[in-house]
Amino acid sequence: MSSSDIHNRKTEHLTLARDGSTQMRSGNGLDSIRFEPISLPELDFSEIRIDSTFLGKPISAPIMIASMSGGTKESEKLNERLAVAAQAMQIPLALGSMRIALEQPELKKAFQLRHIAPTIPILANIGGAQLVEAGGIQRAFDCAEIAAADALIVHLNPLQEALQPNGDRNWRGVGNAIKTLVEESAVPIIVKEVGHGLGTTSVKQLVDLGVAWIDLAGTGGTSWAMIEALRAGDLQRAEIGTAFANFGISAVETLNAINQEPEKYASCRFIASGGIRSGLDIARSLRAGATLCSAAKPFLDAADKGGEAIESLVATWCEQLKITCFATGSRDIESLKHARLLHAQ
């Protein structure tokens, strides 16, 4: 794929991601998690703590700005705006796929944000299919170096690639490449889906490969199948993609299944994403077993309004998360993970 093709595709992806029609109709499953209200919390609200650590760095809340895009003029401005807000609010920032920076070194600037965000966790990003290309492992290391990253995300998107014109359809060897990356990388490796979810079969495979962090990126948010259907360019390709608009599994479904056999996954920690739209959603995800939550579209929408809107969104979610702690008698995030529920999960 040429660099101009990648540039055009990323521009189209950002435009379509803003479109409400690309949001999944299938829910994120979080409504199934119902906290028991505690009317005598015996807490001082001002003393509730929602701060945490991630990748060895302190963060103000278990919230991450998820991977979006990069490498175009528009996404360069977007990344800079997100980085300023993430630094101000002390939350992690995940970068979009960095393939274009490898193809066109002059576009590296869109991913070089450490001067803007010196203290927060920043995560580089490369596609799983790119790992099996010639020099793929080294290119992954290059992504982490370009971004001065604290970790490297490998995103898995076979459904999206199958629907994408000229998408990467040869996925043989991706698992072995991830194993090599885990063994040789100087920074932690995080594996994520792009919004159609990872079931326990895939999660167990990744755990066996030595992956210690997995972003479940489940259904409920943006449908990349629908995005590819909308940009297909012909009616047949659009019809093929539309059938998969709500395909996948939610993060909470996978977390619930993991909780049935926790010993199988004890070496791994999980990030919940896919339709996270409030601090209550974050609280529910943490109660289901996630360590961190991430979201993309809410931050994309806020970024279109300016940096203050991003900071306001984070502040709103933090307040909602604190209120959930207060209403469940939880003094901090660890206590919240054991808050009483109205029914067993």
Image: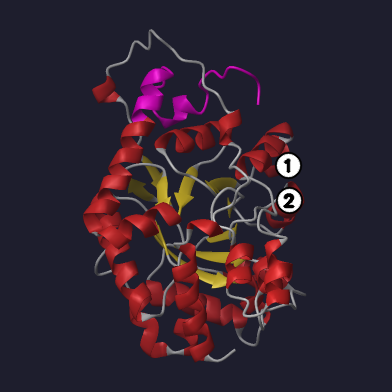
What residue appears at the point 42 percent right and 31 percent down from the top-left corner?
333
> Residue 11, image x and y in percent?
45, 77
Crowding near the residue tagged with mark 2, few <14, some 14–19, many ≥20 C-alpha atoms within 10 Å: some
What residue appears at the point 57 percent right and 31 percent down from the top-left corner?
31
Q: Is residue 313 above or below residue 148?
A: above
Location of the N terminus (image quadrant):
bottom right
Can residue 330 be found in the magenta stretch? yes
> Residue 118, image x and y in percent?
27, 63
> Residue 137, image x and y in percent?
60, 78
Q: Which mark is residue 264?
A: 1
In the image, what residue type sits under mark 2?
Answer: Lys
Q: Is residue 252 above or below residue 207?
A: above
Asked which colour scheme the image uses, the reply is secondary structure
Q: Which mark is residue 204?
A: 2
Label total for image? 2
Horizontal placement of 87 versus 162: left or right? left
In the image, what residue type sits under mark 1?
Answer: Lys
Q: Which residues are magenta?
A: 322-345
What residue appears at the point 74 percent right and 56 percent down from the top-left corner?
205
Q: Secondary structure at mark 2?
A: helix
> Residue 76, image x and y in percent?
33, 75
Looking at this view, is 39 or 94 the one in front? 39
Asked whether the viewer can see residue 228, the reply is: yes
Horizontal placement of 166 versus 319: left or right? right
The answer to whether the residue labelled 2 contacts the one labelled 1, judged by CB atoms less than 8 Å apart, is yes
Asked whether the viewer can see residue 331, the reply is: no
